[in-house]
Amino acid sequence: MVVGGPDHEGQAALRSDLRIVADMVEPGSRVLDVGCGDGALLAYLGHVKQVDGRGVELSQSGVNACVRHGLSVIQGDADTDLKAYPSDAFDYVILGQTLQATRNPKEVLQEMVRIGRRAIVSFPNFGFWKVRLELLMTGRMPMTDVLSYEWYETPNIHLCSLKDFISLCDEVGVVIERGVVLNSGGRDIDFSPGGLFANLFSREGIFLVRRRDSSD
């Protein structure tokens, strides 16, 4: 999932959304990175924030890359294997650019906030204006920098907009503590649920969430 190998020295090798994810994680936390790719985020968090990091990755090549860099990663599937983890086993469960590729995003989100005190989710925004315009003008499934697959080979089977994700969180009792969106130029902007244009002008969303409790 991540371009380039792990870089232990800083954020330069991280995707823009992963840099934001890293900033949301408190030092010394217990972290599970689901769909961790080659482990770039885990490596950074371990080196810079001294987290106790674990990873789950579907591809064997990704697992092999992680193991070569000394990361604690197992092969697994977000749709089936999160159920095996005990509740509150981690401080953060991270799912970077993978929610839309799961078979049951609703269950995956529920499992994430069960096994983690907080979860961090990033995904491409299908409500982005460039996506809407391409579909309108060409009548074909849109392709963008973050949605770069042809329709017949894409792993992205459950595309959603920012509004869709917010609605899902409301439905399953998940509280959004913080949201950050990336615009077409890659600039990050704090997300406001009441904002009029975030769903239209944001190419990606990154959300820090937790399960709802009695105080909410």
Image (tube, rainbow, N blue to C red):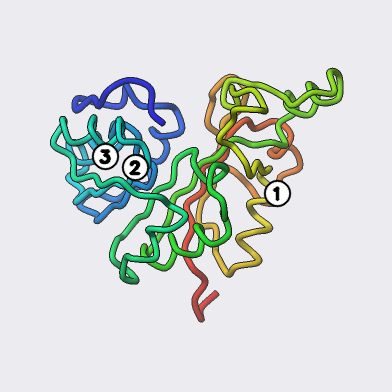
* Residue 57 in picture, x, y percent from top left: 34, 42
Mark 1: secondary structure: helix
Pinpoint residue 197: horizontal percent, then vertical percent.
74, 37
Circle 1 or circle 2, nearest the eye: 2
Mark seen at residue 163: 1
Above or below: residue 15 compared with residue 96: above
Q: Marks 1 and 2, Cα distance to the nearest angstrom?
A: 28 Å
Badge 3 density bin: few <14, some 14–19, many ≥20, Cα 10 Å: many
Q: Say what secondary structure mark 3 lies in.
A: helix
The residue closer to the viewer here, 197 or 117, is: 117
| Left/right of residue 118 with respect to residue 137 in the rendered view | left
**Is 28 on the left-hand or right-hand side of 123?**
left
User: Nearer the N terminus, badge 3 or badge 2?
Assistant: 3
Which label's residue is closer to the chain start, 3 or 1?
Answer: 3
Disc 2 designates what residue? 57
Gap between marks 3 and 2, in whole Å? Answer: 12 Å
From what the image shows, is residue 193 above or below residue 210?
above
Discs 1, 2 touching: Cβ within 8 Å: no
User: Which-is-in-front pick, marks 3 and 1?
Assistant: 3
Task: List the residue tagged with mark 3.
Answer: 42
User: Which quadrant of the view contains residue 60?
Assistant: top left
Q: What residue type is labelled 1?
A: Lys
Residue drawn at the location 19% of the way across and 41% of the way down:
46
